[in-house]
Image (cartoon, rainbow, N blue to C red):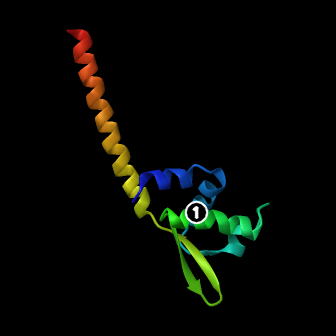
Amino acid sequence: MNPALVFAALGDTTRLALVGKLCGRHPYSISQLTHGSKLTRQAITKHLRVLESAGIVHSVRAGRESRFEFDPQPMEGLRQYLDFVSEQWDQALSRLKAFVEE
């Protein structure tokens, strides 16, 4: 998992909204994801491909159409990455505090 790819993919409000929709219990077709949106099928497809290349969603063939579903694994990887970075910052701030208080 490349955290930069996942962060970049989630950095777009449209893609973030798509992830929100895809967090449901079943896969969605592009038609279902486009319904009620001002975006075209092509625009939705483009955003889904970015999410898919980051590993956040994957497609499953259902007859003639692809259905997309959320994959939580990259989010777990991000959580672990953010926990690691947070711990590094906590340690750096503790060292700075100890240095200043000397």
**Residue at the spot 58% in from the left edge and 73% down from the top edge:** 68
Q: Hey, which residue is sitting farthest left in the picture? A: 102
Say left or right for 25 vs 88.
right
What is the number of callouts on the image? 1
- Establish if 23 lies above or below 91: below
Residue 100 against residue 38 in the figure, above or below: above
Q: Which residue lies furthest to the bottom in this view?
A: 63
Which residue lies at the image location 58% right of the left edge and 59% below the top edge? 20
Q: Which quadrant of the figure contains the N terminus?
A: bottom left
Residue projecting furthest to the top: 102
Quarter of the figure with residue 87: top left
In the rendered image of this protein, does residue 101 appear above or below residue 28? above
Which residue: 43% across, 52% down?
3
Q: Is residue 8 left or right of residue 63?
A: left
The quadrant of the picture occupied by the C terminus is: top left
The location of residue 22, given as percent across then percent down, is: 57, 66
Pointer 1: what residue? 50
Q: Answer yes or no: is residue 23 visible.
A: no
Residue 60 visible here: yes
Q: Where is residue 85 in the image (x, y as percent from the top left)?
A: 34, 40
Residue 3 higher or lower than 24, as above or below: above
Q: Position of residue 88 (x, y in %)?
A: 29, 35
Residue at image point 40% right, 63% down = 73
Element type at marker 1? Answer: helix
The quadrant where residue 23 appears: bottom right
Which residue type carries mark 1?
Val
x and y percentages locating residue 48 in the rendered image? 61, 66
Other-residue count near label 1 (Cα within 10 Å), few / some / many at <14 / 14–19 / ≥20: some
Seen as rendered, the residue at the extreme right is: 38
